[in-house]
Image (spheres, helix red, strand yellow):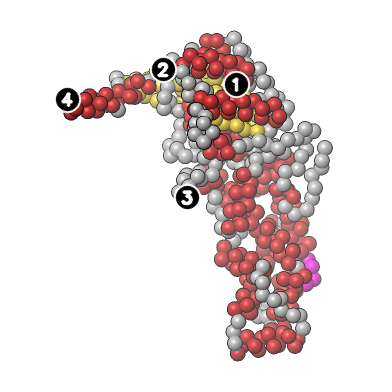
């Protein structure tokens, strides 16, 4: 067992605490199914819901957190505590993008570092008076902006250091204070009046030669804080809540009032695996809400494993080692795979990942939809029965082939859920509420009829005559 190390920003790195810690497994298919990142510029995405960052590097920090789910319960709680602290205390910090960008540019500029002596300082200054140089301007302005920002940041630290702080703030502030207390940095910050030409050379040498790494640490803190402020703003704007984590080795999941954030007026649902359940068998008519519900479940599992708030009123989950979904799988023309064979390969891939990672959440929407009804029935029954025997994982499987349910009822660990629907004359009615049991509604044909497709085809036939 490894212990958690200290030092600035270590709270944002995955540090194992369990005996058989493995990397959290998530793949491109799952990222795509759950719309985590945009495929194209204007695509709606979960990343977009959380991205209120002010700086490019803050955005990169947010992206990095979202690309790398983890299964370290201590680290996940640290992240949640950090965001909760920001929300509960209405904590804010003014991050001015153009100023931070300018400081970053100045710090990494290739211009020669000004020499720290009187003679060179004088000639640098007088030379710039007669023939202004852009390099001297960047240095002068960079120093002034940095000085102003460090002074402001020091005040922020003084305001919150007496508060009970989460690990990220406590650890970071400790490191920042040790930098601010250095005599040279203190002199730099506390210099109230405009700098003389001598002081300008002295502080440029100090910042870019002696204290460059410490200034980089302060900027990195700013970028990470930018990411956390962004997450907290998203939590409040979208009415997300904070997940709770169970340390139990037995997989469990309970979510109240779960919804999908892409829907403007979502219908929320409650879901819970009972003591002996590990597989949810989901049925319902076309357009009744199955896929949206499965995406919402997958999204909550994913967000809870990056330490982010979730689209639900309450959530409690054990820690898992992976999340795999198969919701929008397609054939693979390049490899010569049919849709059905792509599904078979995905099931095999899932089995191998379970074998390696043990505790995994698996979501299959319309298992084996790419083949004939007989093969789909037999294959779905075979695989669902086999999945249900793996007690270390949680499974969600939806299907239109409701007849399978009769054969699955003998498995006491399978939870049967469905989405209710009905016909009002010829109009399908959906309430999008999750129910206990099995659906026998078949509205697909009625939906086809309502689109008047046959009438269009009849018109084409008449015109040809």
Label whose residue precedes the other's in the sequence (2 or 4): 2
Instruction: Compute the Cα span from label 1 to label 4.
Output: 55 Å
Location of residue 325 in the rendering, given as x and y in whole percent from the top left corner: 57, 31
Q: Mark 4 against mark 3, which lies toward the viewer? A: 4
* Residue neighbourhood size for the residue with mark 2, other residues' Cα within 10 Å, grouped as few (<14), some (14–19), many (≥20): some
In front of the other: 324 or 310: 324
CB atoms of marks 1 and 2 within 8 Å: no
Label whose residue precedes the other's in the sequence (1 or 3): 3
| Predominant SS along the magenta part | helix
* Residue neighbourhood size for the residue with mark 1, other residues' Cα within 10 Å, grouped as few (<14), some (14–19), many (≥20): many
Q: Does the magenta stretch include residue 181?
A: yes
Q: Is 274 located above or below residue 145 in the figure?
A: above
Location of residue 383 in the rendering, given as x and y in whole percent from the top left corner: 59, 18
Q: Which image quadrant is residue 75 in?
A: top right
**Residue ID at (65%, 88%):** 127
- Which disc is residue 41 wearing? 3
């Amino acid at each position: 067992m490894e212990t958690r190390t200290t030092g600035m920003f270590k709270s944002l790195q995955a540090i194992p605490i369990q005996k058989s810690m493995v990397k959290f497994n998530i793949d491109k298919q799952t990222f795509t199914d759950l719309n985590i990142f945009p495929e194209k510029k204007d695509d709606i995405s979960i990343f977009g819901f959380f991205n209120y960052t002010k700086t490019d590097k803050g955005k990169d920090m947010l992206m990095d957190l979202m690309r790398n789910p983890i299964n370290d319960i201590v680290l996940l709680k640290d992240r949640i505590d950090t965001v909760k602290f920001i929300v509960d205390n209405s904590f804010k910090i003014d991050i001015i993008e153009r100023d931070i960008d300018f400081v970053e540019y100045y710090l990494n500029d290739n211009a020669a570092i000004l020499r720290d002596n009187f003679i060179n300082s004088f000639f640098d200054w007088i030379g710039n008076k007669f023939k202004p140089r852009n390099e001297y301007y960047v240095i002068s302005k960079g120093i002034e902006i940095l000085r102003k920002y460090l002074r402001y940041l020091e005040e922020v630290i003084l305001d919150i250091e007496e508060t009970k702080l989460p690990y990220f703030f406590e650890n970071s502030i400790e490191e920042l204070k040790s930098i601010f207390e250095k005599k040279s940095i203190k002199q730099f910050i506390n210099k109230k009046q405009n700098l003389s030409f001598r002081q300008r050379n002295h502080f440029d040498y100090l910042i870019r030669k002696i204290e460059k790494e410490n200034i980089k640490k302060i900027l990195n803190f700013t970028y990470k804080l930018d990411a956390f402020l962004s997450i907290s703003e998203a939590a409040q704007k979208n009415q997300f809540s904070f997940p709770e984590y169970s340390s139990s080795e037995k997989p469990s999941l309970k979510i109240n009032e779960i919804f999908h954030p892409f829907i403007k007026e979502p219908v929320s649902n409650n879901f819970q695996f009972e003591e002996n359940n590990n597989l949810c068998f989901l049925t319902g008519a076309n357009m009744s809400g199955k896929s949206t519900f499965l995406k919402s479940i997958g999204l909550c599992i994913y967000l809870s494993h990056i330490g982010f708030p979730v689209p639900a009123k309450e959530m409690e989950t054990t820690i898992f080692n992976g999340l795999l979904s198969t919701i929008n799988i397609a054939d693979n023309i390049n490899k010569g795979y049919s849709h059905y064979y792509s599904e078979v390969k995905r099931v095999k891939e899932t089995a191998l990942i379970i074998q390696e990672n043990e505790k995994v959440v698996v979501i299959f929407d319309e298992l084996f939809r790419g083949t004939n009804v007989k093969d789909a029935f037999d294959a779905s029954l075979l695989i669902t029965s086999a999945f249900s025997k793996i007690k270390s994982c949680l499974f969600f499987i939806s299907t239109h082939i409701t007849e399978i349910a009769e054969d699955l009822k003998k498995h006491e660990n399978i939870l049967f859920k469905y989405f209710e629907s009905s016909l009002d004359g010829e109009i399908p009615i959906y309430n999008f509420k999750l129910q206990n049991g099995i659906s026998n509604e078949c509205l697909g044909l009625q939906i086809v009829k309502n689109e008047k497709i046959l009438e269009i085809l009849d018109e084409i036939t008449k015109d040809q005559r």
